[in-house]
Amino acid sequence: MANTDFHLQFQEFEDEQGFTENNQGATTVTIDDPIKSRKQRKAPGTAFEEEDNDDQTELLSGQRKSAPFWTFEYYQTLFDVDSHQVKNRIIGSILPWPGKNFVEVYLRSNPDLYGPFWICATLVFAIAVSGNISSFLVHHGQPKFRYVPDFSKVTMAATAIYSYAGLVPLALWGFLTWRNRKITSLVSYSFLQIVCVYGYSLSIYIPAVILWIIPSEGLRWCSIVVALCLSGSVLVMTFWPAIRDDKPRINIAIISTIIILHVLLAVGCKACFFSTYETDPSKEHKEPLTATSISLSTQSK
C-alpha cells in the first residue's frame, strides 16, 4: 500500500462581516452560549425579570389580581373550596361557641358560594319531599284520599329560601355599608361574606325539616326552637361586632330585624308545608247531609 502524506494546514477564517460580504448567498448559523443567553434573558431591567418579580410579589403577598365580575374567572374563585373547609364551616354554623365570630374563624378573606348554594338547594328539596310525605301521613287511611305529589312545593320552597338567602344579606350589607361611612370604627363585612354566613346558617334546618315528617306538633315546634337558637346565635355573634359601636337603638333594631326575619322563615315554612290543620273531605259532606236531615224531620212533623 502506498503511503499517503497528509499535510495539516491551519487556515485563518475571515471575520463574520468579511465572510458575509464575500459570500452573499451563504447561509450562516450562529450558536450562542446557553449560559450567556440565560443571563441575557434574566438581565436586570428586562421584561422577563419584571414579570417574574411581579409573580413572586403576588405569591408572597397572598394576593392575586381579581378578575372583573363579568368574567367566568371571577365566579370560579367563589367555588374554589375543598370539602374539608365546607365541613368545618357547616359544623361551625351548627355548633356555635360564645365569643367566636364565624367570619373571623371560618371564612376570613375566603368566602365561598359553593356551600351556601348547595345548602339552600338541599333545604329546598328536603322541604318539598318532607312536606309531601307529611301530607301523605296526615291523610293516610281516609276512604276518598288519593295521594298526588305536589310539585309546586319545590317552586315555593326555592322562591322562599333563595330570596331569603339573597335579599336579606343584600339589605343588611347596604345598611352596614351606610353606617360604616358615618362611623369608621365599625367592622365592615363584604357582601359575599354576609351571603356566606346566611347560607351556612341554614344548614341546621335540613335535619329539622326531616324531623317534621313525623306528624307531631310538639316535636316540630321543639325542632324549630332548637334550630332557631343555634342558627340565630351564629348570626347575632357574627354581626354584633359590626354594630356594637353604633347607637343603642340602632343595635336593637338590627338584631331584632335579623332574629324576626329568621323566625318568620322557619315558622312560615312550617305553616305552609307542614300544616296538619287541613280540611277533611269526609267532614265536608256531613254538614249538607245534616242540614237536609234536619229540614226533612221538621217537614214530617
Image (cartoon, grey):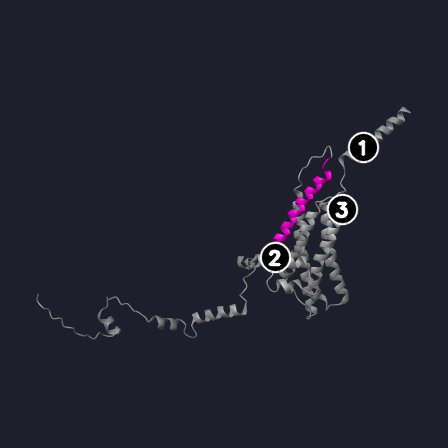
Q: Residues within 10 Å of mark 2 (few under 14, many from 20)?
A: few
Residue placed most toward the observer, 212 or 128: 212
- The amino acid beneath tag 2 is Lys
What residue is drawn where x is 76% and y is 35%?
Answer: 281
Determine the main secondary structure of the stretch shown in magenta.
helix
Q: Please name the residue that numbered disc 2 is placed on.
A: 87
Decide: is 266 above or below 66. Answer: above
Is residue 195 visible in the rendered structure shown here? no
Q: Is residue 242 left or right of residue 60?
A: right
| The N terminus - image quarter | bottom left
As drawn, the residue found furthest toward the left would be 2
Q: Which residue is mark 3?
A: 217
Which amino acid lies under the numbered mark 3 shown in the image of this protein? Glu
Report how far apart the C-alphas of labels 2 and 1 lie in the structure.
54 Å
The residue identified by callout 1 is: 286
- Image: magenta residue range: 114-141
| Disc 3 element | helix
Q: Amino acid at mark 1?
A: Lys
Q: Secondary structure at mark 2?
A: helix
Mark 1 Cα-neighbour bin, 10 Å: few <14, some 14–19, many ≥20: few
Q: Earlier in the sequence, mark 3 or mark 2?
A: 2
- Residue 132 coordinates in the image, percent (x, y): 68, 42
Q: Could one spot residue 22 in this view of the protein?
A: yes
As helix, strand or loop, the secondary structure at mark 1 comes to: helix
Most distant residue in the top direction: 300
Residue 78 spot, x, y in % from top left: 57, 59
